[in-house]
Image (cartoon, rainbow, N blue to C red):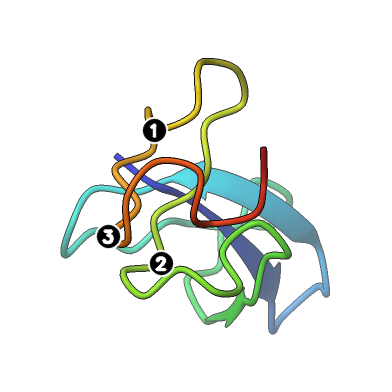
């Protein structure tokens, strides 16, 4: 499950959320579901927008171009 960053359009709260495909999260501050998905620094350059692992060996993020090619490690 990827982690996405969001900004609530109602209260401007920014937050991260683990999101299953097809799921729409709610703002933890106000409960609204009108959100902007933000571009995370760690997803820029990934063709499939998967988040890089917080910890672990290079190649554990399944980057499409192969281990060590994403430039994050």
Q: Marks 2 and 1: CB-CB under 8 Å?
A: no
Which residue position is annotated with label 1?
A: 59
- Please state which of the two labelled residues, at mark 3 or mark 2, is closer to the viewer: 3
Q: From this view, report whether residue 52 is shown above or below residue 27.
A: above
Numbered tag placed on residue 49 in the rendering: 2
Which element carries disc 2, helix, strand or loop? loop
Q: Marks 3 and 1: CB-CB under 8 Å?
A: no
Residue depicted at x 39% and y 41% = 67
How far, Cα to Cα, is label 2 from label 1? 15 Å
Numbered tag placed on residue 64 in the rendering: 3
Snapshot quadrant of residue 8? bottom right
Q: Residues within 10 Å of mark 1 (few under 14, many from 20)?
A: some
Residue depicted at x 71% and y 72% = 7
Snapshot quadrant of residue 9? bottom right
Spot occupied by residue 57 in the image (x, y as percentages of width and height): 50, 17
Residue depicted at x 64% and y 46% = 28
Q: Nearer the viewer, residue 32 or 4?
A: 4
Tally of marks: 3
How far, Cα to Cα, is label 3 from label 2? 10 Å
Spot occupied by residue 56 in the image (x, y as percentages of width and height): 53, 15
Earlier-in-chain disc, 3 versus 1: 1
- Left of 25 or right of it: where is 66? left
Earlier-in-chain disc, 2 versus 1: 2
Residue depicted at x 78% and y 61% = 14
Q: Quadrant of the C terminus?
A: top right
């Amino acid at each position: 499950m990827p982690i996405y960053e969001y900004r609530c359009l109602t209260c401007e709260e920014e937050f991260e959320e683990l999101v299953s495909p097809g799921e729409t999260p709610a703002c933890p501050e106000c409960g609204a579901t009108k959100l902007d998905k933000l571009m995370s620094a760690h997803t820029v350059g990934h063709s499939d927008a998967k988040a890089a692992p917080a910890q672990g060996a290079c190649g554990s993020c399944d980057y499409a171009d192969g281990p060590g090619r994403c430039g994050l490690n």
